[in-house]
Amino acid sequence: MKKKARYTLIRGSYYILYPDLPKNGPQPDGDTINFLPDNEDLVTGLKRFNNRSAERKHLGTYNVRFEGIDALETHFMNRHQKLDKAQAARNRMLAHMGFGNVTFWSNQENNVETAQHHPVRGCLIANGIESNGRVLGLVYPGEIAAGKADGERIFVDKERLDTSVNAKLVSEGLAYAELYSSMPHSLIVRMRQLVKAARQAGLGFWPEESVQVGHGVKITDASDLPKMVIFPKLYRRLVKYFEDGHTGLASFDVWIRANGTDRDDKALLPTQEFGNLHDLYEVEGGSIKLQYEPEDLTFEST
């Protein structure tokens, strides 16, 4: 049986700053980057997972979300996770992409001031447009598919996945695997293998992970969060929960379950039962711990 080519090959250039808008650039982090396609029609023609079209940015670029990974947040709602680890993911991504020496503005540390090589040519193996209007895909610097036409449908095996910047960051312990049903099952299995190997080897942030399976951590308010390494999807929920005026975790589970659309994501659990984000964790006595490793859930694509 012929293997289904689910992805679209799109060539173009990767941007991390806007030369004409100093201090107002894209703010790259460990799992997002801006991309200017050679052929814009290839982006606008991608599958939309929730009917939202791709959001076009300055200079005609599009924001790309690295598929299958979730790096620690450097600037979510003007807050961040453990900053040295969040910036390590961002800086390693920039190095893998080939931007060379990159400097950031001293008074706007998320905005790039200079890059040795910019923009950088590369390929995007795109899966579709996700719920925030970003292009979801596998990211590569340079040419990876000589002989294949721009816009050609392409099959991704584990060898091709392993050479993506997405997989490299997970393999180095610099990003969690955040897996959705839109990703082919064989690639989900491979990403799980990579993240478990990195955790077992104690690479990157794994020795400092705060909220773990079987290990509870007390969190009182948002001021506790910047010190911690937490699955970023869960971290983002905690930030919004505290922004809503809560103190302590007594109401967190009720708050999550109250909004299944924006908070309590549907997921296939490792038990092969259908569940939600609230099945990932347990809150007890003001502490929160994980019930499963995050990569063992497959979230429903929206």
Image: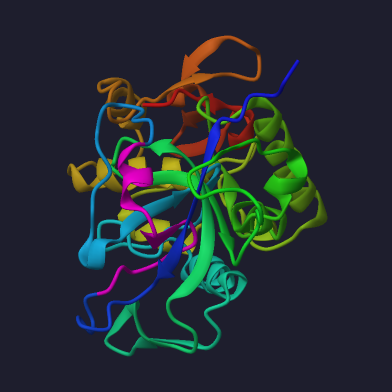
Kindly identify the residue that appears in the image at 79 percent across and 47 percent down.
197
The part of the image, by quadrant, that contains residue 43 is: top left
Kindly identify the residue that appears in the image at 48 percent across and 44 percent down.
151
Of residues 281 and 26, the one nearer the viewer is: 26
Kindly identify the residue that appears in the image at 55 percent across and 66 percent down.
89
Would you say residue 229 is visible in this rendering?
no
- Up-down relation of residue 122 to residue 273 (above or below): below
Horizontal relation, residue 302 to residue 82: left or right: left
- Up-down relation of residue 216 to residue 103 (above or below): above
Would you say residue 17 is visible in this rendering?
yes
List x then y, in percent, for residue 65: 43, 50
Q: Quadrant of the N terminus?
A: top right
Kindly identify the residue that appears in the image at 36 percent across and 54 percent down.
39
Of residues 229 and 135, the one nearer the viewer is: 135
43 falls in the magenta region: yes
Magenta region, residue range: 25-45
Horizontal relation, residue 160 to residue 65: left or right: right
Q: How many marks?
A: 0
The part of the image, by quadrant, that contains residue 136 is: top left
